[in-house]
Every structure is written in C-alpha cells, then in structure tokens.
Image (cartoon, rainbow, N blue to C red):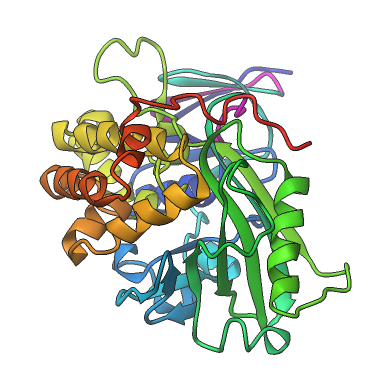
Amino acid sequence: MTNRRHDVDICVVGLGPTGRALASRCAAAGLTVAVVDPRPDHLWNPTYSAWADELPDWLPETVVAARIEAPTVWTNVERRIERPYVVLSKTELWKALPIDNVQVEAQRAIDVRAHEVDLADGDTIQAAVVIDARGLPPVHKRPAASAHGIFVDADRVAEFVPPGEALMLDWRPENGAGNDEPPSFLYSVPIGDGTVIFEETTLGVPGGLTQGELRKRVLHRLATHGIELTGDEPTEGCHYPLDQPPPRRFGRGDSPVPFGSRGGMMHPCTGYSVADSLALTDTVVAALQAGADPVDALWTNKARLVYWMRMRGVAGMGRLTTEQMRSMFDAFFTATPRQQRALLSEHDDASALATVLFSTVAHTWPFRWRYDLVGWTNRKRWVDWSAS
C-alpha cells in the first residue's frame, strides 16, 4: 500500500471520553485534528460519574443522567456530603463531543511518537503534536482500583438505596470479609435508567482483588439487606493501576504527550480520571494554540506536588485493614469542604491538601494505627495476598 502523509496540528490516539473530548475541543478551536482508534464508533462500557462542580461549563446539562444532591458516606457513623454528585449518560456525553470535522483512522496505532503515528495499514500520520490518550498498562503488583458492579432494578432496592439517594462510601461490615482480608467498600448510585449499581470496590491494594472475590462480597452485602438476585442482572467490572505518573517535564525524547489516565490524571486515592481530564482539555487546547508545551501547562509545580502527596495517601490506604480504613475516612470527613475537595478533586490546591492529609493522620484513632498509615509498620501487609 502506498504511504500517505497527513499533516495536522494534533493527532489523538485513543477515543475514550478523554481522547474524544480533546479531539472535539481542538477541532472546535480551529485546529486540524486526526484521531486513531480501532473502534471509533464504539460506545464506552464503564459507568462514569463525577462531582457536579468538576464538570466544565461547556458540557450541556443533558450529559447528566442522574443527580444526587447529598450522597451518603458510612464510616463509624453516617454522614451526608453536601456536594451534588452526578452519573453521566454515556450516550449524551458522546453526542456532546462531536468529531465531525476530524480525520478518523479506524485502525490500530503501531508506533506512537512525538510527531508521527504509524498505522496498521502502513500509513503514517504526521502532526505538530501527538497526544496519547490510550488506556492504562497492566496492574501486576501496582496499587490498584478493582471493582465489581451489579445493576439492580431501583424499585427492588428502594429500602436500601432510596430514590434520589446514593452510598458514596459504605464501610459498614456487611460484605462478609474479615479484618485479616484486604478492605473493600460499597459504592451504590442510581444510573438514571431505572437501575442502581451496587459496586464493591477496593483502592490501593497491591495487585487489587479479583472479580470473583468482589462479587462474593457485594452479594453478601445485598443478602444482608434481604436482597436476593436472579443471576441475570447486568454487571460491570474494572481493574487498573492507580500510580500512573505524570509525564516528565524534561527528557521526554520522541515520546508523545500522554493525556487522561495515561498521563497522570488517574486520581491515586479515588480512581477517578474522566472529570479532571474533561476539565483540563481546554488547558491543552490553549497551549497548542499558543505553541506551548501542553505538559508544562497541565503539570505546574503545584499540580506535581499534589500528585506526589496523593501518592503518599494511596500508599497509606494500601496497607490498612477494614477497621483502620473506617477510622481514617471517619477522620477525613470531618475536614472542611475545601480540604475535602483538595483531596477528592482539585488539581493543584497543594496547601489545603497538605493540611487535610496531616489532619487525617493526626485524627486517625487508635494512635498506633497512624504508624501503618505513614508506613512505619506493616508496609507490605497485602502484598501477595490471595483469597483462599
């Protein structure tokens, strides 16, 4: 096949929500754009959620499938978080990110470099900037987010999760796991299609947990509340690393610009990346229009410090027991709204994040549990753990 040269301003490799958003916003700003993905018309599988105030203003309200005004957190006590939380409609989000004026290559990228992308059919796309928005590498023994979710008709579970309510973090000891097993919590929100997802989730455990183990735990929780399933309910699962670092400031050589979860925007302590990536797409667009380095625009000194501190947080979570996790989150949710946002959302509020991390460690009780949290003891508690 004859090689063709495509000269564009930006080439985006990977059309998840992050890549599609960046391609759409670049095209809307007048940049010439090419995208590469083997299935460009495939609607995404995962369920995406966010705090309502994280979403950029340019997204229409139609992307919100369900809105919870004050989700519930269970630690040692029940708390309401007075911060609206939303579940996104994948179909409407897709529509809100048009790529009609974009050159679409429906094939695999064989080699991705700073200014060139080699395609499976032998063609090469040349671009002023190449953005790598593909997925994450394998977990192996890295600190991971693992979850298994089951979608249940809302009317069947109304006593557990009433209409308009959500369980953001449920650490009640109802999943059948002992304190000598890696901790996991329940995340349960209405999806907006008449179902509620019940998702058993673990964060920070090296290597994560298997789908089988997490399914066993979520079924135990549901049974505790008198909810028996047919076995035909739809499910979804996830398993990905939490420690994907930001791109280096210098010495990237011929590497493309990584963006989204591949570029350090996977929140190490929550496993969220889509909302932050959507909010930062225009930062990348502005840098490209100005001829500046998008990495410098995205990863300021404060943003890098925030990432480093969050990595200390996920390392601490990855060695705690269930009782210790409950105590730690109990301390965290006594922080001010700004401090909570600094950990959960803000890209570069380093001072508030340092304050809340110090306060959380200082108020985790009993005192000896703080040694595990900061890594003085039990540093490898769950490394190589496996269900018997």
The answer to whether 311 is drawn above or below residue 177 in the figure is above
Identified at 30% across, 54% down, the residue is: 345
Residue furthest left as drawn: 351
Q: Write down the quadrant of residue 152 in the picture.
A: bottom right
Identified at 76% across, 55% down, the residue is: 216
Residue 132 at x, y percent in the picture: 47, 31
Horizontal side of 251 relative to 11 (left or right) equals: left
User: Which quadrant is home to the C terminus?
Assistant: top right
Part of the protein shown in magenta: 121-140
**Labels in figure, total:** 0
The answer to which of 200 and 193 lies nearer the viewer is 200
- Please say whether residue 135 is one of the residues in the magenta stretch: yes
Residue 342 at x, y percent in the picture: 22, 52
User: Is residue 275 at all visible to an observer of this figure?
Assistant: no
Residue 3 at x, y percent in the picture: 63, 17
- Please say whether residue 126 is one of the residues in the magenta stretch: yes
